[in-house]
Image: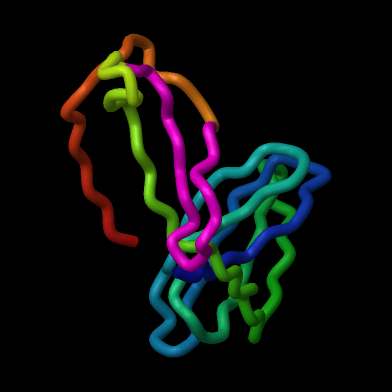
Amino acid sequence: MEVIKISGSLSDASRIIIIKESDWSIESNTTESVGSYEVDGLVSGAKLVAGRKSDGEALVFGNVTPAYVALPARGVFGGGMNSGSVIVNKIEYVTISSTGDVTDFGDLTVARNYLAATSNA
């Protein structure tokens, strides 16, 4: 799975508008706070990126190529039973492309069994 994103840092709160240059449609229109920002979920291709502060000052950059970030495909598991048939509250994940072990990264609010979910990026 890969994520296509544009990110940066703002010295003033601004509206960030991202326009797809292939058909000039608005791909994203968000208000961002001071500091680092990240807009993801973009499609590939050149962008026009405009930032406008509340006082009207604007910066516009054309022919911007978004960054492609490869994310590992992961399987996520929550709850279940341990080897002693005790229902557990663990949340774990495994990177599907690896042969490594699962990693514990949280707990359910209560121990549960027979949970099910699905997702597709």
Going by the image, does 90 lie left or right of 17?
left
For the point 63% across and 65% down, the residue is 6
Quarter of the view holding residue 54:
top right
Above or below, 119 against 31 in this view is below
Q: Residue 97 at x, y = what percent?
A: 48, 67
For the point 59% across and 74% down, the residue is 68
Q: Residue 75 at x, y = what percent?
A: 38, 51
Q: Residue furthest front?
A: 84
Of 41 and 112, nearer the camera is 112
- Whether the magenta-drawn stretch holds residue 97 is answered as yes
Q: Residue 118 at x, y = what percent?
A: 22, 48
Going by the image, does 8 lie left or right of 43?
right
Which residue range is magenta in the image? 88-104
Q: Residue 58 at x, y = what percent?
A: 71, 60
Q: Residue furthest bottom?
A: 22
For the point 69% across and 70% down, the residue is 60
- Whether the magenta-drawn stretch holds residue 121 is answered as no
Going by the image, does 30 lie left or right of 56?
left
- Label total for image: 0
The quadrant in which the C terminus is found is bottom left
Of 120 and 78, nearer the camera is 78
The quadrant in which the N terminus is found is bottom left
For the point 66% across and 58% down, the residue is 51
Of 93 and 15, nearer the camera is 93
